[in-house]
């Protein structure tokens, strides 16, 4: 960059950036942004996966507590982002529960929970819990 000098005549040219310098710096900045763009996409994907993992674990914990209390029925339940039961049209997650008796014990029951974010069947989480049935 040329130094900026105040002059009252046309003897010395004014300082500033030339067109070549401005074009070069804009090209360098755009190249830097283009190399960082894939990192933004990767960060968004990882944030979505972390949110889904946290939500599925919370849903599984809530459904496990309901199963221990005896208020959970076998079948599919549709849930929203907060884990509240909702219709299938407004759901963000689906949870399928299956009750199985434990072999050799009359008082133990195994619950298999299959929690899946809707629209992402490859990210299914399966939880299995064994608990004692309250008489």
Image: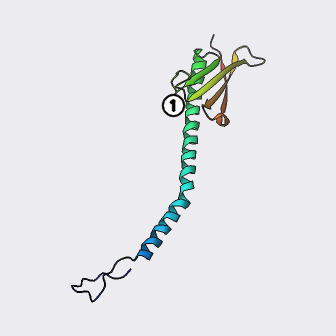
Percent coordinates x, y for residue 29 in the rendering = 48, 66
- Quadrant in which residue 134 is drawn: top right
User: Residue furthest toward the right?
Assistant: 104
Percent coordinates x, y for residue 40 in the rendering = 53, 52
- Where the C terminus falls, by quadrant? top right
- Quadrant in which residue 94 is drawn: top right
Position of 112 with respect to 6 (left or right) is right
Position of 53 with respect to 101 (left or right) is left
User: Residue furthest toward the left?
Assistant: 8
Circle 1 sits on which residue?
81
- Which residue is drawn at the image coordinates 55% and 33% (left, top)? 55
- Which residue is drawn at the image coordinates 38% and 80% (left, top)? 1
The secondary element bearing badge 1 is classed as loop
Pointer 1 local density, CA inside 10 Å: few below 14, some 14–19, many at least 20: some
Q: Nearer the viewer, residue 99 or 86?
A: 86
- Which residue is drawn at the image coordinates 57% and 16% (left, top)? 69
Q: Is residue 6 above or below residue 84?
A: below
């Amino acid at each position: 960059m040329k130094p900026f000098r105040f002059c009252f005549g046309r003897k010395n040219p004014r300082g500033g950036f030339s067109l070549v310098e401005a074009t070069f710096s804009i090209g360098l900045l755009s190249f830097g942004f283009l190399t960082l763009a894939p990192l933004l996409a990767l960060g968004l994907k990882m944030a979505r996966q972390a949110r889904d993992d946290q939500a599925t674990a919370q849903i599984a914990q809530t459904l496990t507590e309901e199963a221990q209390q005896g208020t959970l029925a076998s079948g599919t339940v549709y849930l929203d982002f907060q884990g509240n039961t909702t219709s299938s049209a407004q759901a963000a997650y689906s949870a399928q529960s299956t009750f199985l008796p434990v072999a050799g014990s009359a008082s133990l029951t195994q619950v298999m929970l299959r929690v899946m974010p809707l629209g992402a069947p490859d990210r299914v989480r399966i939880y299995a819990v064994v608990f004692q049935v309250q008489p």
